[in-house]
Image: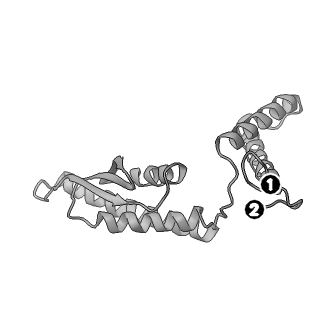
Amino acid sequence: MRGPSGKRDAHTGVGVGASWRSAASRAAWFLCLWLVLAGASLDDIPAATIAVATATWTSLRLLEPGTSRRSPRAILRLALLFLYQSIVAGVDVARRALDPGLPLRPGFVAYPTRLPRGLRRNVFATLTSLLPGTVPAGEEEAQLLYHCLDVDQPVIAELDQEEAALARALYND
């Protein structure tokens, strides 16, 4: 991706215009956070300027601007899917805890993720760790290992659905 000038940032490989847009967007969010936490006071302008500039610089160093576009509609679908699966899984876990007659078949399943190692895979593992009944427990090559309360449940299909929804929402490259 190239910025309006057509130049690329040698450090990040991202278009210079994209870097400035990302920096401006992040700075605006950090300023909003400052205003929520500290309030608006003229006496705080120097401290706010330093804090916002430092947070923006740190953010850009730790999470370089990417070329992916977020899809608000896909993010809403992901949130609704996550809410639905959380409720269904939570009810299932509660039923199993309250009714000792329900079977538990704990064990591990290996999920062959298509997400590359790094931030994207970590976001997926973090998201799925919030769902009741399964927890990421490790990694082997391109597979994430999940500990499940019942390995007979369609865990792989649900993880596949979550991964596809996450990819559509956040990584629409």
Task: Name the element at disc 2.
Answer: loop
Residue linked to disc 2: 1
- Of residue 158 and residue 104, the one placed in the foreground of this image is 158
Q: Is residue 39 above or below residue 2?
A: above
Task: Name the element at disc 1.
Answer: loop
Say few, some or many: other residues with alpha carbon within 10 Å of mark 2 (under 14 / 14 to 19 / 20 or more): some
Say few, some or many: other residues with alpha carbon within 10 Å of mark 1 (under 14 / 14 to 19 / 20 or more): some
Whether the residues at callouts 1 and 2 have beta carbons within 8 Å, the answer is: yes
Image location of residue 83, percent across then percent down: 45, 62
Q: Amino acid at mark 2?
A: Met
- Of residue 134 and residue 111, the one placed in the foreground of this image is 111
Q: Is residue 168 left or right of residue 151?
A: right
Q: Is residue 109 left or right of residue 69?
A: left
Q: Which mark is residue 80?
A: none
Q: Is residue 96 above or below residue 49?
A: below
Image location of residue 12, percent across then percent down: 72, 48
Q: Going 38% across and 63% down the picture, which residue do you hit?
A: 159
Quadrant where the C terminus sits is bottom right
Residue linked to disc 1: 8
